[in-house]
Image: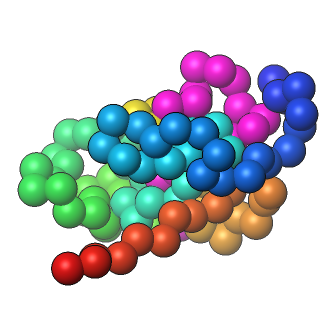
């Protein structure tokens, strides 16, 4: 497995934000998302909602995105879809809190 030279997470918000103003979207920790794991995108919602149990969904496995400090470089992008068991605890997994500010 590839490990980054520093082999640890980095302080957040120290690099420039991406094109839509979000910081640290890849490479620090895998970010859990609400979607259940599916083998492919066949039948996925088209309205941007979370893809929960449906068809081949596995409710014990969830989608993770963004890669972490110990990922292969090819995985370090928000469009890469990985899978993790919902009960997993690991220093390479985390989550992002979001809130409406209106």
Query: Does the magenta run of residues contain 62?
Result: yes
Residue name at image x 58 percent, y 20 percent: 74
Could you tell me which quadrant the N terminus lies in? Answer: top right
The magenta stretch spans which residues? 60-77
Could you tell me which quadrant the C terminus lies in? Answer: bottom left
Q: Specify whether 53 is left or right of 23.
A: left
Q: Where is residue 38 shown, x and y percent of the image?
A: 37, 48
Q: Where is residue 6 shown, x and y percent of the image?
A: 89, 34
In the image, is residue 73 above or below residue 36?
above
Q: Where is residue 93 shown, x and y percent of the image?
A: 68, 56
Residue name at image x 75 percent, y 38 percent: 69
Numbered circles on residues, count: 0
Q: Nearer the viewer, residue 38 or 91?
A: 91
Residue 66 can be seen, yes or no: no
Query: Does the magenta run of residues contain 73?
Result: yes
Q: Where is residue 26 shown, x and y percent of the image?
A: 56, 39
Q: Specify whether 36 is left or right of 65.
A: left
Q: Residue furthest right?
A: 6
Residue name at image x 50 percent, y 31 percent: 77
In the image, is residue 72 above or below residue 95?
above
């Amino acid at each position: 497995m590839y490990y980054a030279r520093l082999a640890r997470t980095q302080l957040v918000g120290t690099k420039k934000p991406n094109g839509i103003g979000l910081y640290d979207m890849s490479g620090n920790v895998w970010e859990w998302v609400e979607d259940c794991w599916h083998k492919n995108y066949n039948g996925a919602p088209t309205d941007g909602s979370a893809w929960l149990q449906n068809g081949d969904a596995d409710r014990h496995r969830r989608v993770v995105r963004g890669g972490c400090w110990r990922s292969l470089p090819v995985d370090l992008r928000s469009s890469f879809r990985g899978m993790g068991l919902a009960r997993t605890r690991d220093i390479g997994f985390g989550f992002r809190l979001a809130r409406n500010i209106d």
